Amino acid sequence: MEEAQVKPRVRVKAGAGYQPRSVTAPMRARAGYLRDSQSGVIKARPSSLREHRDEVRRVWWRAAGLALDMLQNSGRLKGVADQIIADTIGVELTLNPQPNLAALGYSQKEATDWVRLVKNRFKVWAWNPWECDFRGKFTIPQMTDVGLRNWLAFGESLGMVQFMSPAQRARYGARTGTKFLLISPQKLVQETSEIEGLFQGIYHDANGRPTHYRFEETEGGIKVKRDYRVRDDEGRQLIMHAFDPLSADDVRGITPLASTFRKYLMAENLDDATAQMAHLQTLYAIVLTSEKPSADAFEAFEAMKDVGGAGAADMATDFINYYKAELDRAAENEIRIGAGAGISHLAPGEKLGFETTGVPGKDYLPFAASLHRETARALGVTYGGYTLDHTAATYASTMMENATVHPIATRRTDRIAAPHVLVPFASWLDEQISEGLIPFKGGIEVYEANRDSVLWALCLGPSKPTADDEKAAKAATERLLNGSSSVDVEASANGQDAEEVFERNMYWHKRYTDAGMPSPFARKTGSDPAGGKAEASEKALGKRQDA
């Protein structure tokens, strides 16, 4: 027979019940996020959670002012700005149109010829400031450089597509109406009115899409504010706004130097303090050693006068008068540093010594290098490129630095630099096709119906840096031979257009063969040259087969 289950009884003290634990009570073992150390470093750091776009709006003007001041007054930052432009743009971005023309009745040859015509015409337009720039001053590559500098200083770059009427073109002698106008980001107002959908100078509709930009302009010495549409009635983009958002709600960018301000200025102060201390020690590291008593001796004489004693007061008075005479004599002497350096006189028992400078100390270089590395990392450049210090660099470390930084430069090419080329290119091609200057099958109606697929293009930046060109070339050849890459991929990695490379190679191959000269392109495939290891291996194989 099973025993009946009895409900356990627990005696509870009268008045006692469930007491919820206070949320502020200390826990014996706290796990998870924000577990602090015994020193309380997390608790001591103030922080608050705000929308990122509000934070950008709050600090944008101050951050832009600091960044611009640092770029203008720092040789190191001026150099790293040039380095970023060289890594991101090179001499210029190569336009690589990739339209889908097969669906519009184009054969492969016709599509290739059409793309070649577009690229050649656009290059001529982009390198003519009178044609491409609304102000008539800069080429498209130059405006791309300025845009990247604006991004470094302001965190964003702004431009606008303008169209000159035939009368305006006749006035300037321009052949095309499409012009690109680069605008300083500080001209975009900071006004915010969320009721109107205006946030930091940009109007948004109910879905959060930008509709107008408000710029501050100067007319006849008077500042006026004007609103410009983002797109026209047919959906063509008129405003170019390139920035790197952190949050999905961001509408403006902030300088990438903002995260480096504290450490960069700390490094700058370290350099200034080190230089000042070195100068002071170099000029004034002179020690005068004397056997004469110090202030303690004079205090002892004063005490003797107070205590009393036979002749104590007279002795103290005579001693003080003696040293007063010595001080008067010393005041007439001098130690000269600089032109005509010399010492007029030293009293008996005095010795002049020169100390060596102790600044900078042994910890200066590693500490300064740590500050520089943080700034270089935030800007997306290598430490060697930022400081030109390659003392501890090796082949492996250089290759790893390049492998780490090059994707950042490539991303910056696509996100920040490329819009300076692609936005004016789209408007320019619209004009060329609509006016019949560039033929298109089906005419303007077919083009406008397929505009997005026809305008699809990429911008290729400079080639990936390498520490050994021979090894890089052999690696590219090996990838092509084993089928893990293709000619267009390898050409893009070198900042080249595969179609242009093919056309130039074919042109020069024909020139060589027509002239009866051996063509450099008629070579064996593979990394071994003709008559090298490959030929020797074939001969060895033939001998084995004969045997």
Image (cartoon, rainbow, N blue to C red):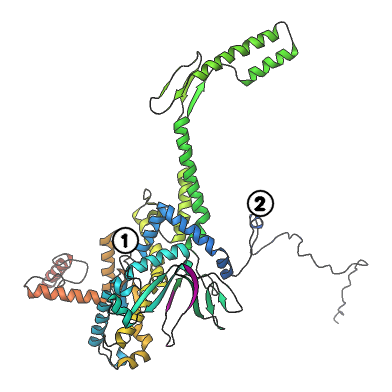
- Disc 1 to disc 2, how far (Cα)? 46 Å
Magenta-drawn segment = 221-240
Q: Residue furthest front?
A: 220
- Looking at the rendered structure, the kind of residue marked 1 is Thr
Inspect the magenta stretch and tell me whether residue 473 lies in it.
no
Residue 391 location, x and y as percent?
37, 48
Give the crowd class for mark 2: few <14, some 14-19, many >=20 residues within 10 Å.
Answer: few
Q: Who is closer to the viewer here, 521 or 167? A: 167
Q: Is residue 187 left or right of residue 35?
A: left
Rendered-image quadrant of the N terminus: bottom right
Inspect the magenta stretch and tell me whether residue 223 lies in it.
yes
Q: Who is closer to the viewer here, 102 or 444? A: 444
Total number of numbered discs in the rendering: 2
Q: Residue at x 59, y 15 (%)?
A: 324
Query: Which of the two discs, 1 and 2, labels the residue nearer the N terminus?
Result: 2
Rendered-image quadrant of the C terminus: bottom left
Q: Residue at x 44, y 63 (%)?
A: 152
Residue 291 location, x and y as percent?
55, 16
Q: Is residue 323 left or right of residue 87?
A: right
Residue position for label 2: 39
Image vertical order of residue 1 relative to residue 482, above or below: below
Residue position for label 1: 466
Residue 438 location, x and y as percent?
26, 85
User: Circle 1 — which element?
Assistant: loop
Q: Is residue 402 left or right of residue 542?
A: right
Q: Which of the 4 quarters of the picture holds residue 479?
A: bottom left
